[in-house]
Amino acid sequence: MTTLVAPPTESEGTGEPRAMKKPRKVGRWILFGAMVIVGIVMLYPFWVMVITSLKSESQFLSGGGFSWLSWTSLTSVIPIGQEVLSSTILCSASIFIILCVGLPAGFAFSKLRFRSSTAVFLVIVSAMMVPLQAILMPEFVNVTRLHLTGGYTGAILVYAALGTPFSVFLFTTYFRGVPDELIEAGIVDGLGYFGAMWRLVLPIAVPAIATVTVLQFIQIWDDLLVGLLFIQNTSDRPITVGLAVLAAGRTTSIPGLMAGSIISALPAMLVYLGFQRYLVKGLTMGIDR
């Protein structure tokens, strides 16, 4: 007696019909190809920067040859070390203020209930929608009247004011996912609200802190307008301003400018790559929660 066996309609181990499996593979290959194209478009300018920086001025004009002259002579063109230090000081101080304000504010808006808290929160978050160019000149007038344009102070305060609304919004969103029972248990144990935030909530807020730190670091490090307007001392100017001044000169060495641009771009890239795991988790925490 012959037994007829129907042909399998599902792929082994996956439980998916073969008719559905093939379109998914095609879709994955299309997505992969699109990502490769986007990656090439994004990385090509950086590749041009690297190749151009490995040429002397004469080699750049002639179109052939390689040389380290642009890198070795960069310090004689602009004070690259001092400018990198200035950018580091601006980023560190500004992010420190942003975190010191955003953390307790986010905790208060998420866990403490007070009159008009929603309205105050919406006013703070709405400041994220105001473009920098719209408030740049009024801020410059105010900082000038306070005589804070000589060094880092004015620029640090402006950067902190621009970054605080985002940090308050992100920390508020994150802390709303923390169970209220955890805070109440800490208060019952005598920690108080500040102690509960410092000892219970802060250790689990590392993804949110990393997200704010990375995004603000990239924004402040790459900014030009605030550093150009609010830092009048040439010895305190950040690297972006130094490169802008170099590019605006009568005789500009393109290979030297590319070498300085690479040095300017590397810190932001390294910070992003180093904290990428926390950054992705912090940006997707609203979906996970």
Image (tube, rainbow, N blue to C red):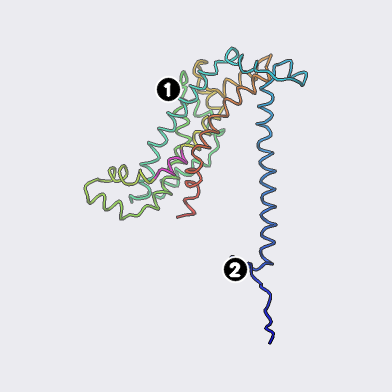
Name the residue at the bottom extreme: 1
Q: Is residue 123 above or below residue 18?
A: above
Toward the viewer: 232 or 193?
Answer: 193
Q: Is residue 36 above or below residue 246?
A: below
Name the residue at the front extreme: 1
At label 2, counting other C-alpha atoms closer than 10 Å, the crowd grade (few under 14, some 14-19, many 20 or more) is few
> On the rendered structure, is 157 left or right of 31?
left
In 3D space, how far apart are the residues under numbered discs 1 and 2 (Cα atoms)?
A: 70 Å
Magenta range: 205-212
Residue denoted by label 1: 146
Inspect the magenta stretch and tell me whether residue 210 lies in it: yes
> On the rendered structure, is 190 left or right of 38?
left
Is residue 114 among the parts visible in the rendering?
no
Residue 15 disc label? 2
Please identify, in this view, whether the residue under mark 1 or under mark 2 is nearer the observer: 2
In which quadrant of the rendered view does residue 64 lie?
top right
Q: Amino acid at mark 2?
A: Gly
Q: Quadrant of the C terminus?
A: bottom left
Q: Earlier in the sequence, mark 1 or mark 2?
A: 2
Residue occupying image coordinates x 69% and y 53%: 29
> On the rendered structure, is 272 left or right of 8?
left
Inspect the magenta stretch and tell me whether residue 26 lies in it: no
Q: Mainly helix, strand or loop, the magenta region? A: helix
Q: Quadrant of the N terminus?
A: bottom right
At label 1, counting other C-alpha atoms closer than 10 Å, the crowd grade (few under 14, some 14-19, many 20 or more) is few
In the rendered image, residue 144, in percent from the top left (x then y), is placed at 47, 22
In the rendered image, residue 104, in percent from the top left (x then y), is placed at 35, 41
Name the residue at the top extreme: 76
In the rendered image, residue 130, in percent from the top left (x then y), is placed at 53, 39
In which quadrant of the rendered view does residue 21 lie?
bottom right
Q: Amino acid at mark 1?
A: Leu
Q: Secondary structure at mark 1?
A: loop
